[in-house]
Image: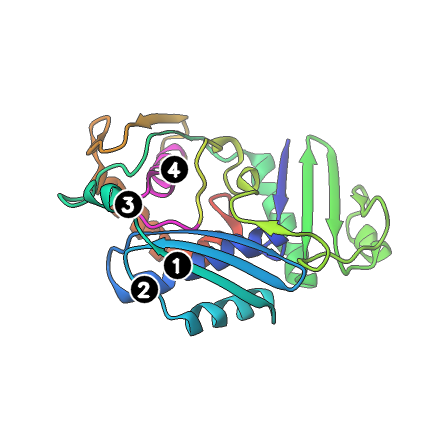
């Protein structure tokens, strides 16, 4: 059983905006410290960024407009907590307590992701999709139900009929679709809107990559300040995640589909 949402779902718009802001921070310096929260809906985008560098407001507004259209931007920027900042002074160390689980992606999860991408390529608007063994449920906004039903005759399509989605209908918030992004690898931390020093980003990516490589579950935990996860240095974990993010084209691109792509 798996649920996938596309990049135009209001929650994913928030993930993408947060990712774009982290990209802006990385364009200024190799290793920024930043954590971003985003709430979007009904003509306004609220953003709070805790960061050790100042970000140009015009770049943030341009990113929001590119991703979510013309909405008002309420941006609050505050300095990173000084005590927490000291944790990273001697090199990369875990930025928080956490548990992490990487799980191999299943055939069912791959199949639904392909369906979601095919539908999104055609319609390009808010959509949510579920596959449970032989039950396929497709909810796609701004798409004629009959047309989608003809393409997927065995699916349950838009059970309440045609609908209009997006942030004018449904408010979005960051890191609310982690099941879509991580499938069986979901843990307590969110993937989006944070720099690579944050364990929620780097350790989750590292554990997921290890699981795909070995075909076996990978579980780990850390305490704030740890410089190793098991026998692997935290610096090595950060660099592994950095290469993965770079291979996708940045944090915004990562946020579009998450780890299950």
Decide which of tag 2 and tag 3 comes sooner along the chain. Answer: 2
Where residue 180 appears, as percent x and y from the top left, is 57, 41
In contact (CB < 8 Å): disc 2 and disc 4: no
Decide which of tag 2 and tag 4 comes sooner along the chain. Answer: 2
In contact (CB < 8 Å): disc 3 and disc 4: no
Decide which of tag 1 and tag 4 comes sooner along the chain. Answer: 1
Can you tell which mark lies on residue 204?
Answer: 4
C-alpha distance separating marks 1 and 4: 26 Å
Residue 48 falls left or right of residue 10: left
In contact (CB < 8 Å): disc 2 and disc 1: yes
C-alpha distance separating marks 2 and 1: 8 Å
C-alpha distance separating marks 2 and 3: 18 Å
Seen at 26% across and 41% down, the residue is 84
Q: Main secondary structure of the magenta part?
A: helix
Badge 2 crowding class, 10 Å Cα cut-off, few under 14, some 14 to 19, many 20 or more, is few
Where residue 157 appears, as percent x and y from the top left, is 80, 46
């Amino acid at each position: 059983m798996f649920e996938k949402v596309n990049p135009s779902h209001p929650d994913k718009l928030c993930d993408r905006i947060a990712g774009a802001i982290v990209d802006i921070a990385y364009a200024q310096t190799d290793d920024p410290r930043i954590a971003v929260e985003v709430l979007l809906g009904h003509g306004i985008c609220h953003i709070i960024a805790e960061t050790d560098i100042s970000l140009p407001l015009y770049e943030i507004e341009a990113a929001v407009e590119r991703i979510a259209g013309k909405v008002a931007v309420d941006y609050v920027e505050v300095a990173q907590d000084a005590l927490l900042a000291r944790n990273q002074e001697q090199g990369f160390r875990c930025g928080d307590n956490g548990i992490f689980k990487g799980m191999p992606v299943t055939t069912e999860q791959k199949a639904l992701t392909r369906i979601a991408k095919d539908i999104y390529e055609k319609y390009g608007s808010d959509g949510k999709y579920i596959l449970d063994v032989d039950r396929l449920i497709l909810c796609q906004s701004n798409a004629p139900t009959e047309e989608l039903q003809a393409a997927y005759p065995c699916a349950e399509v838009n059970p309440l009929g045609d609908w209009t989605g997006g942030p004018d209908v449904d408010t979005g918030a960051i890191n609310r679709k982690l099941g879509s992004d991580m499938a069986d690898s979901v843990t307590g931390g969110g993937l989006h809107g944070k720099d690579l020093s944050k364990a929620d980003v780097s350790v989750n990516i590292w554990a997921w990559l290890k699981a795909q490589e070995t075909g076996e579950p990978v579980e780990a935990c850390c305490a704030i300040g740890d410089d190793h996860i098991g026998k692997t240095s935290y610096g090595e974990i950060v660099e592994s995640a950095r290469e993965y993010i770079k291979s996708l084209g940045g944090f915004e691109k990562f946020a579009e589909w998450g780890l299950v792509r």
